[in-house]
Amino acid sequence: MNKNYKKIILGIVLVGLVIMGIFAYNIYSILFGSNTNFETETYEVFIPSDADYNTAFLIIADAVNDRDNLHTTAVKKKYNENIKSGRFLIKKGSSNNDIINTVRSQNMPIKVTFNNQERVENLAGRLSQQIEPDSLTLLKAMKDPEFLKENGLDENTALSIYLPNSYETYWNTSAERFRDKMLSYHKQFWTAEKLAKAKKLDLSPSEVYTLASIVQKETAKVDEMPRVAGVYLNRLARGIKLDADPTVIYAKKKSENDFEQQIKQVLYVHLEIDNPYNTYRYSSLPPGPIVTPDLTAINAVLNPEKHDYLYFVANVENFGYHKFAKTLAQHNRNAAAYRRWIAKNNR
């Protein structure tokens, strides 16, 4: 073999190695080179449960510079054949390999919060802003007759298993799974000790929740809630109507099927509304809660202040709080003072 022939063979080998090196480099760059286009530390991606590859790819592709390389990687790793739904966090500077690994195996939970919801319809709407199921799907699960019957509930008390708090769940959880998760937390909350306290008050857990919803609406002061709860418990024990203004407002909204209206002041005409939620006309507790009460309000009902008060009215000398009275005569004097302040200040 002559020297020229050896040089040709060597040249071909070297060219082949260069070509292989370039090919390997390109493959490496496609798979492992950075391919994100955002400045924040992470980028949220939400893949719907019914998404096909094209839908999922377009959602993910908003986070990258080179869509072709992302597609090449997705196909190579067979992501196009096995789409996963959920919430995924793509890290700044991620490679295509990192991105595809993330969206096929790292569904991240979210924090769901809610409070002060007047009806299950409102709660369903609030939840639909945070998790995948829409409000109608959530509402159907929450008002499912079989579910309500199994748990001793009806449409009036359906709200009473939802305890306002912050809950960790997956964005793509189903409406039924989320509802059942809330029921589980509800059961955990009602320990043997709490059930014993409710029984001592001659109230069921749903009735405690309903009374707590009234307390919640009456005062925003946590330290005053046990005293307000004590007033209503005293009235219940003596067979006196609750005469709670927040229930009148709720009765008006419910009677008119208009929960968007704003009612700043309860008028005498409102007290005549013929609706079981109107505690000026109907004795005992209303059929169900008028809002989702905070845990502080529920605990206030379970641990009420012991006293002989039967009445209270807003305290204009200490805004946000109330003046309490044991007798109607004292209450009337307090109420008159409040009305004079209202008239003087054009409220």
Image (spheres, rainbow, N blue to C red):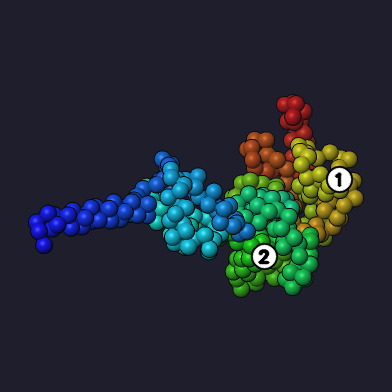
The reply, left or right, for residue 282 in relation to residue 130 is right
Disc number placed over residue 256 in the picture, else none = 1
- From the viewer's side, name the closer residue of 220 and 165: 165
The reply, left or right, for residue 50 in relation to residue 260 is left
Amino acid at pointer 1 = Glu
Disc number placed over residue 176 in the picture, else none = 2
Q: Residue 340 sits in which quadrant?
A: top right
Placement of the N terminus among the 4 image quadrants: bottom left
Q: Examine the rendering and report whether any part of residue 113 can be seen.
A: no
Residue depicted at x 18% and y 58%: 9
Disc number placed over residue 112 in the picture, else none = none
First in sequence: mark 2 or mark 1? 2
Residue 21 placed where, x, y %?
Answer: 26, 54
Closer mark to the observer between disc 2 and disc 1: 2
- From the viewer's side, name the closer residue of 6 and 257: 6
Label 2 element class: helix
Amino acid at pointer 2 = Glu
- From the viewer's side, name the closer residue of 213 and 129: 129
Residue 180, above or below 274: below
Residue 72 placed where, x, y %?
Answer: 44, 54
Label 2 to label 1, Cα distance in Å? 30 Å
Residue depicted at x 40% and y 56%: 97
Placement of the C terminus among the 4 image quadrants: top right
Residue 65, above or below 297: above
Q: Examine the rendering and report whether any part of residue 288 can be seen.
A: yes
Q: Residue 195 sits in which quadrant?
A: bottom right
